[in-house]
Image (cartoon, rainbow, N blue to C red):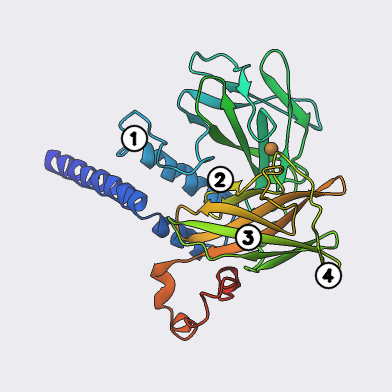
């Protein structure tokens, strides 16, 4: 009896060790995490649970308690460097939250970044429903806005801000909108997107872990748009979310309106660095004739591990033509 008990204890101990090792392995190879996600079709609760679990493991073996999020993309943590994103009960139709600071109290001092003190980005966990809005700050540190969560489902809300005296942060939290969920499939990778009569094409070949310039070209009714209007201090604003964990990349535009070298279209360029191979959804906000619109793209960022697929061996020539990356259609 006693031996059996000790034995099972030993087995459990082994399992715990292997479990920890597995967690480290996943951290060392984010591609594995993505590959695992890619195999599972679901983009709903199953992914949520796994993403939470990965975050939990990350805090254990690697964190060591200081600067633990320094190597992570933004938006994966609800609390970082003493700051925490806290949703607040709000009347129907309104969304409200606070940021609490290292002292546990709501933060009321924020620096402006891209013309605003708070950028609230929301997307459903299936990467649909993207909205980028700017809430109002009340004196008690509560941010409020008409709710951008416009359909039932599990949403990720990102608060992108710089606390006065602190470093820029993007915190993320899941918010559930009750109701019948209609899962929306992720559109296939494509190098052009249309919105309200505008056609936006995407050029550039992102490689994981390398800085890449992505250039978006805006046309309307077949003609280049050369009078884009500044929006948030730029002619375009680009956010990328990684499929599977909704890691958040806030991508900075190259050049600024009025700098003497940046034209108001038709091209808008961004310096990007994707942290890993995988599938990403890109959201370009641009303003023209007083209206802000969002063009969305699915992009597959090169995955060396997937290059063994037979189809790729025959498709290699011609992928460096500057238009190739989003065009890989085999999903
Ligand atoms: Cu914003």
Front one among 199 and 268: 268
Residue at label 4? 222
Relative to 17, 46 lies left or right: right
Residue 60 vertical position relative to residue 287 in the rendered view, above or below? above
Q: Determine the CA span between mark 3 and mark 1.
A: 36 Å
- Sequence-wise first label, 1 or 2: 1
- Sequence-wise first label, 4 or 2: 4
**Quarter of the view holding residue 57:** top left
Residue 41 vertical position relative to residue 139 in the rendered view, above or below? below
Front one among 134 and 99: 134
- Sequence-wise first label, 3 or 4: 3
Toward the front, the furthest residue is: 260
Q: Are marks 3 and 1 in contact (CB under 8 Å)?
A: no
Q: Secondary structure at mark 3?
A: strand
Q: Position of residue 14 (x, y in %)?
A: 21, 47
Graded by Cα atoms within 10 Å as few (under 14), some (14 to 19) or many (20 or more), the crowding at tag 1 reads few
Residue at label 2? 248
Graded by Cα atoms within 10 Å as few (under 14), some (14 to 19) or many (20 or more), the crowding at tag 2 reads many
- The residue drawn where x is 60% and y is 72% is 323
Q: Determine the CA span between mark 4 and mark 2.
A: 32 Å
Q: Position of residue 261 (x, y in %)?
A: 66, 50
**Quarter of the view holding residue 157:** top right
Q: Position of residue 175 (x, y in %)?
A: 65, 37
Q: Secondary structure at mark 4?
A: loop
Instruction: Specify whether residue 119 is in view.
Output: yes
Relative to 103, 295 lies left or right: right
Q: Determine the CA span between mark 4 and mark 1.
A: 51 Å
Q: Secondary structure at mark 1?
A: loop
* Comparing labels 3 and 2, the label whose residue is closer to the camera: 3
Q: Which mark is residue 63?
A: 1
Residue at label 3? 215
């Amino acid at each position: 009896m006693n031996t059996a008990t000790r034995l099972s204890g030993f087995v459990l101990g082994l399992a715990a060790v292997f479990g920890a090792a597995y967690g480290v392995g996943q951290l060392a190879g984010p591609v594995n995490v993505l590959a695992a996600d890619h195999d599972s079709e679901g983009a709903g609760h199953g992914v949520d649970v796994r993403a939470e679990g990965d975050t939990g493991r990350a805090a254990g073996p690697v964190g060591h308690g200081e600067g633990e999020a320094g190597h992570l993309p933004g938006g994966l943590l609800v609390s970082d460097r003493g700051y925490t994103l806290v949703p607040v009960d709000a009347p129907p139709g309104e969304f409200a939250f606070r940021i609490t600071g290292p002292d546990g109290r709501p933060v009321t001092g924020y620096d402006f970044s891209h013309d605003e003190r708070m950028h609230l980005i929301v997307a459903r966990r299936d990467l649909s429903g993207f909205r980028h809005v700017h809430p109002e700050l009340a004196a008690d540190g509560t941010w409020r806005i008409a709710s951008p969560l416009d359909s039932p489902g599990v949403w990720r809300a990102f608060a992108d801000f710089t606390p006065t005296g602190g470093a820029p942060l993007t915190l993320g939290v899941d918010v559930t909108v009750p109701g019948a969920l209609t899962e929306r499939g992720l559109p296939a990778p494509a190098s052009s997107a249309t919105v309200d009569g505008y056609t936006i094409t995407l050029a550039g070949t992102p490689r994981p872990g390398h800085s890449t310039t992505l250039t978006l070209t805006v046309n309307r009714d077949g003609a280049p748009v050369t009078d884009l209007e500044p929006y948030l201090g730029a002619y375009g604003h680009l956010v990328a979310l990684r499929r599977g964990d909704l890691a958040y990349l806030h991508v900075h535009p190259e050049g600024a309106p009025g700098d003497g070298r940046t034209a108001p279209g038709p091209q808008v360029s961004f310096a990007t660095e994707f942290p890993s191979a995988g599938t990403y959804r890109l959201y370009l906000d641009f303003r023209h004739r007083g209206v802000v619109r969002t063009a969305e793209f699915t992009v597959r960022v090169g995955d060396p591990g997937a290059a063994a697929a037979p189809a790729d061996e025959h498709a290699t020539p011609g992928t460096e033509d500057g238009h190739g990356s989003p065009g890989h259609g085999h999903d």
